[in-house]
Amino acid sequence: MSEARERLVVIGNGMAGVACVDQILKHTTAFDITIFGDETHVNYNRILLSSVLAGEKEFEDIVLNDIDWYRRHGIRARLGVRVEAIDRLARTVTGAGGSVTPYDKLIIATGSSAFVPPISGIGKGGVFVWRTMDDTRQLVALSGQGIKAVVIGGGLLGLEAARGLQVRGCDVTVVHLAGHLMERQLDATGGSYLTRKMNALGINVLTGRYTQAILGGSHVEGLRFHDGSEIEANLVVIAAGIRPNVSLAKQAGLQVDRGIVVNDHLETSDPRIFAVGECTEHRGQIFGLVAPLFEQGKVLAAAITGNRGAAFEASAPAAKLKIMGVDVFSAGECDDSKPGAQSIRYEDPALGIYKKLILQEDRLIGAILVGDASDDHRYFDWIRTKKDLAKDRRYLLTPPPAADSGFDVAQMADSETVCGCLGVTKGAIIQAVHEHGVCSMAQLKDRTRASSGCGSCGQLCKSLLQAVVPGFAEDKVKALCDCVAFSQDQLREMIRTQQLKSVQDVLDIYGNSIGCEVCKPAISYLVDVIWCGGHQEDRSARFINDRVHANIQKDGTFSVVPRMRGGVTTPAELRRIADVAEKYNVPMVKVTGSQRIDLLGIRKEDLPGVWADLDMPSGQAYAKGLRMVKTCVGSEFCRFGTQDSIAAGVELEKRLENLFTPHKTKLAVVGCPRNCAEATVKDIGLVGQDGSWQVVVGGAAGKGVRKADLLVTVESTDEALESAELFF
Amino acid sequence: MIPAATGWVRVTAAADIPPREGRAVRLGGADVAIFNLGERFVAIENRCPHRGGPLADGIVSNHDGAITVTCPLHNWRICLESGTVRKPTTGPACRRSYPAKVEDGVVLVDLRGINTDPLGEHPGC
Ligand SMILES: Cc1cc2nc3c(=O)[nH]c(=O)nc-3n(C[C@H](O)[C@H](O)[C@H](O)COP(=O)(O)OP(=O)(O)OC[C@H]3O[C@@H](n4cnc5c(N)ncnc54)[C@H](O)[C@@H]3O)c2cc1C
Ligand code: FES
């Protein structure tokens, strides 16, 4: 086909822009698409930056469209390129660096930026905003034990920031201008319940404070408020609201008010230019949550492909705080002072539960839930559908006596929204099951994207699948064992937020208080790594090998393997080993496959004596942790060696020994590609070559054999060690 | 060595066995594993019915409501009250369990006594 394809340029590689492109691809693949993004990352789920900050997820986990997606759809991704101008006459956009790209249709999806209030000293070091992956990485790098962090702004974003910094060890205070937290979503009572919950997590909350100045020299040292009071701080995060990114549109002469003004079909004042996302303003309204933005994307996609359908109508806003253990939901109005509005309330200070529904003429117009948000879907649906509740008024906050207490998926109407972020209804999920054979959460996500936004509807999606899929199988994220009905990830989160330091605490609170050989060692590992060894060690929860630093054998005796870094030993050590072997009548002395010496058949009662006489650290040949770093001879002696593998191996083992991992970990360093110490079938291997090192990872030579993949090639030994360490 | 025939035998200070751990002792010719379950102590022959693993070195666990110890060799679960195997089978294979108690901070084991299965499924060994 010779006809030139229509060129579509998208400015902004964020959630709304890319979701919209995804929708356009459903209509047509005829466009020649270029997406500009000034962030260097592929499209990711910005919402889940909260989870990244809190250490529950890594960047890879929140990628929405990987580079392969762009390739598959022939989309040119210009990442790390900021668009600096739009020329509407020439129909081109100019990227930073001067590149000029012509368009036939243009979509502006520039999102918004953090609003930085004009506080004196705001430019000091240590003051940050939080919007992007890079911001998040910076915060992660700077937070830790002993850091006094202050978050300015007690809205959704501010609270999630506070929580993330706190689980990373910071001492956190939230400073809020209004009289109570989340004042746009909660009333004063709801706000005070929330404050109590934040306090219970160990986060300080100061409300009604206007920050007047950031104190300190070049780096922040504290904050001063309008009343003259001061507080210490060495890290400040500003979460005081957002402002739509409109400067490009404004310069181009498009109609701009607070946001880029769009009509019901997301067209701007220029018929070739559309806008979507947080940069837009629709009927005087601007946006801060994704649900309506995805809706916009659908309407835009229809309009731009000539399939103009329903007009965009912003749905009632619904917000949910993503802090585990702090359930907060708010939808619609939160002000009940309007004429004709009536509110129904329930509160239990002891349980920390507060609920308020606001009705007008028997229709729900707003809901606030703190401490128990299990009914959020029902309420949100009532608000959306403007359901007449005259008959149900008696049971709005409490279920009718006979009904079972849990939320019943069978009672949901097909039109009810299950996933608020992506606007997926119950009907759509059932259709996915019946027509596309969806039978797991992963497939459901793939097909409908349900629960790929903030994720809070996951449980509901699962219940639905359970109800309609015969033989529904849970995804691989499995509970640890029968004793503790939570997955590792959940436990990690609970241990962190609830500050649990011992295995028994975890079992008492979340398990059957007894535990077993599966969960106890796993929880031991979790409390150990989460608190970096600052946990309460419980030997009874460890496997016998870890208790006695030796490996139990078939007859109940033990084998002892002293540490011998890089397989290097000394005559003195060998002499001691020989003495021990004789003194305790060790029946077998053997060189292991890991270049160490194994003393087999030692009686349990002799173990303390053996270790004392050896006077060497344990080689942890039994541990789920670093076992050893195997080395070949290397350049010091070998005539083929190109790198000093022994020195590098010994150093690597020193740095990583005593670190625990979910599974045993074996490393090796070889001085040349002949690979004598088999580095390419180790979890991490360093392969020396002339003038550089290859760092290879992911190898195995156990039940299955796998060749390691190349991670990086670096020049110096220092860099090689550092890469290995970072990967570890 | 204390002969088995004397019934209750004083074994060791209760404080010598940490909570949820086991210790092996040899009593009147029998290898016995004593466990501290927090609120009480239990005693069982220290040989796994499977291949003789040292039960005293196992992790205290539970199986369908019974308190068990998991053998460190191949993860069989043995009921600490009755000595019966709970996993992998609930067959008749079992080990002898002994009544145990603490008096004045000292653990006592009754080498002549026999415990019965708390779930009533199997007689003790
Ligand atoms: C930490 C955090 C938690 C959140 N939690 C929730 C939540 O729980 N629920 C919810 O609904 N919403 C949440 N949000 C809000 C949600 O992320 C946004 O509503 C959504 O990302 C908006 O999408 P967008 O595409 O309009 O903007 P963005 O996702 O910000 O995308 C815009 C992109 O355009 C780029 N860009 C801007 N100007 C240019 C230019 N000139 N040239 C090239 N590129 C440009 C930006 O760098 C950005 O990458 C959260 C936001 C944050 C930061
Ligand atoms: S010896 Fe106890 S499980 Fe095999």
Image: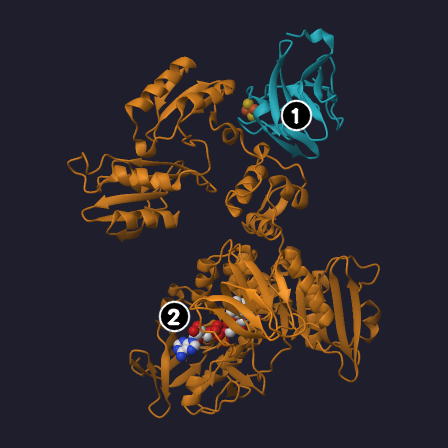
Chain colours: A orange, B cyan
Position of residue A651 measured from the top left corner of the image (x, y, whole percent): 32, 40
Left or right: residue A98 versus residue A529 is left
Give the label, 2 or 1, closer to the camera: 1
Judge by depth and name the residue closer to the eye, A410 or B101.
B101
Position of residue A95 measured from the top left corner of the image (x, y, whole percent): 33, 80
Name the quarter where the N terminus of chain A is drawn: bottom left
- The residue most toward the left is A639
Q: State the residue at coordinates (59%, 32%).
A: A540
Looking at numbered disc 2 in the image, what kind of residue is underneath it?
A: His
Judge by depth and name the residue closer to the eye, A307 or A481.
A481
- Distance from the alpha carbon under mark 2 to that under mark 1: 69 Å
Is there one chain holding both mark 2 and mark 1? no
Q: Which residue is mark 1?
A: B15
Q: Secondary structure at mark 1?
A: helix
Position of residue A65 measured from the top left corner of the image (x, y, whole percent): 44, 66
Q: Is residue B63 above or below residue A468?
A: above
- Label 1 is found on which chain of the structure? B
Q: State the residue at coordinates (33%, 34%).
A: A565
Q: Secondary structure at mark 2?
A: loop
Whether ligand 1 has any atom under 8 Å from the Cβ at mark 2 is answered as: no
Looking at numbered disc 1 in the image, what kind of residue is underneath it?
A: Ala
Q: Quadrant of residue A271?
A: bottom left
Residue A73, labelled with which disc?
2
Position of residue A391 measured from the top left corner of the image (x, y, whole percent): 83, 73
On the question of residue A30 being in view, the answer is no
Asked if marks 2 and 1 touch (Cβ < 8 Å), the reply is: no
Q: Quadrant of residue B118?
A: top right
Residue B5, labelled with which disc?
none
Q: Quadrant of ligand 2?
A: top right
